[in-house]
Amino acid sequence: MPRFSDTSLQNSKPAVDRKNRIKDPKNIMRTVDPAALEMLQYTKENNIITAFDRWSAQQPQCAFGYQGICCRICFAGPCRIKAEEGPGSMGICGAKDYTIVARNAIRMMAGGASAHSDHGREIANVLLHMAEGHAPDYRVADSDKLHRVAKRIRLSVEGKSDLELAKEVAEAALADFGRQTGEPCTFLWSTICEGRKGKFSECDVVPTSIDRAVVEVLHRTHVGVDADPVNIIFGGIKAALGDYTGMHLSTDLSDILFGTPKPVLSEANLGVIDPDKVNIIVHGHNPILSQMVVDTAREMEEEAKAAGAKGIGIAGICCTGNEVLSRNGIPIATSYMAQELAIATGAIDVMVVDVQCIMPAVRNVAECFGTKLVTTLPISKIPGSYHFAFDEAKAKESAAGVIRLAIETFKTRKESGRATRVPQFKNKLMAGFSLEALMDLFAAINPDNPISVLTDAILNGEIAGVCLLAGCNNLEAVYEKNHTEIIKGLAQNNVFMVGTGCVMQAAGKHGLLNYDAVEKYAGPGLKAFIDRLYEANKDKLPDKLPLAFHMGSCVDNTRAADLWTAMANELKVDVPKVPFVASAPEAMSEKAVAIGTWVIANGIPCHVGAMPPLEGSNLVWSVVTCIAHDVFGGNFILETDPEVAVKKLVAALEYRTWKLRIHRKAAEVYETELCQAF
Ligand code: XCC
Ligand code: SF4
């Protein structure tokens, strides 16, 4: 019985307690990325302040905030829980630790749901305006996907043109934001399995509209409304399922507009920057602009060459980078925590940003190095930067404006004769594994039932299960150390890995998204499985397959949810029985909190490797780490030690596989339905 082979793993507490968690806080060289280390040495010598210095300056961080027991919801506060008993054990209004921790947590979920789904709303609007003829530079890039999505959400497709259908799909997506009646959100209900529909209805956590679910969180957490931590958390789960809805429609509609990713080769880390090119960094999240920049740059190569450049070099940071990597093979410069370090190379002419994860500090560094920082969207401006209002009606023109600014800046850079320093580190990678691309690989082995290739490999013990890797960077962990160690550890244990976001950028930078990594780190079962997939797909793949499969940006995490749903349907069980886990080794953002919450509500254990502000309430802690498992079948595994985290994740997978095999045996022997009880 694998779950009980190591009883210490049953303890929901992390291996290292709060007081001993942060090691060496005054050392700013907190990374295992050689390019970042080289740049940090340089910024240190030149008194350029970066996130690494600011993190160090913030230590020790406020213990009340860190544990989630500081309340600022009304300005009778701030209130902090200072004692176990007596008046200091509550806020002025009488809110206890569990109310305060739960309220803070679900406000983070609502923040994440807002960010993801507002991004989705933008894409839906572009699709609608394109279909109505008001956004002429966009088109339906993937008509098959448009038809698949339309059928899935039960639109009739007969006799309709792509544009007519695109309009209806966009309208259905937009309806998910503001429905006033009681039906569930379409992009949630059309993508989950029957078991989850029953569970979500039974627990009353089904969002009928994304906006409403977010507003409800803000309402119930207003001073003097909801004080019951479990009720509060269930409200948060509803918003998190709104987050799922917004993410799913965002991915669907992005694929329709820009194409569904296919395996593509590229490179990652600062070494991808060539100082002799006009260099543009696309940073943020929304592909609406970055995709236009990529397409338009191709047409402007000659202009760049006329200015004395070798060409136009585009590289990505954060998830905008993941979007254009997945669809166009645009290289990754670096991930969230090193965004300032990319500018400090001195070789970036323009950094163009849209929304989310853009540190305001990039502007200061940009000023030191003559880099032009360009903001593009009305809700995301940074003092001192250039604002080029992005106009979807003239998308190409908007993109061309940004590229022209980069060409001008390149000229000034070259004329000034300023030195650049680009650390010579980069690694080859393969990305572009949309669910469709992954299913294609499986279909080469079993065209009639592709997903069974994966589930059979688990049932016969070749691989241990699947892990979704997601999330950010957080200097509580050493930058990219948790990411890389967890990937290597899971590989050794034969776990098949898919991933998104900054963790996949770390994987790419550290050479974990190519075949060399399979040879170095994969256990024998995982290696055999990846080799078998490659052999069957040889003639259509650009290279051998990687150790982990890059599924896209953070908004694309629902691609992984579709994978576990397909596995659940194939295995004829509900999701909590599928050998599937998730890990956010260096999570940081509110979006990560929202994702983690819908992951566990879907019945998937989810590891988080940087501590979210929950430790201030034992009650809330036990709800998210234990009771969630009883109710939804998924739970948080809050563990900051990467080695212990790997053990806990593998144990969770082994337990599920073990149980699944027993239930299948029993069902065979007694000729009964597969037992649904947990
Ligand atoms: Fe941002 Fe998406 Fe986190 Fe990276 S992983 S730091 S959210 S860019 Ni999503
Ligand atoms: Fe304090 Fe209550 Fe106001 Fe929070 S809501 S700041 S606990 S009085």
Image: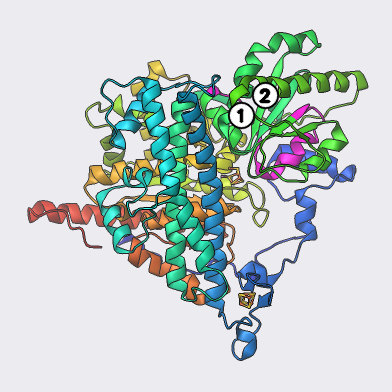
Say if the magenta span includes residue 654: no
Q: Amino acid at mark 2?
A: Ser
Q: Which residue is mark 2?
A: 398
Nearer-N-terminus badge (2/1): 1
Span shown in magenta: 328-350
Name the residue at 78% across, 26% down.
Answer: 349
Q: Position of residue 317 (x, y in %)?
A: 65, 35
Mark 2 surroundings within 10 Å by alpha-carbon count, few (fewer than 14), some (14 through 19), many (20 or more): many
Residue closer to the observer: 240 or 63:
240
Q: Position of residue 188 (x, y in %)?
A: 36, 47
Name the residue at 18% across, 58% down.
Answer: 675
Distance between mark 2 and mark 1 Cα atoms: 8 Å
Specify the quadrant of the image occupied by residue 676: bottom left
Name the quadrant of the N terminus.
bottom left
- The answer to whether marks 2 and 1 mark residues whose Cβ atoms lie closer than 8 Å is yes
Residue closer to the observer: 81 or 76:
76
User: Is residue 368 depicted above or below 161 in this figure?
Assistant: below
Q: Amino acid at mark 1?
A: Leu
Q: Position of residue 339 (x, y in %)?
A: 71, 40
Q: Which residue is mark 1?
A: 289
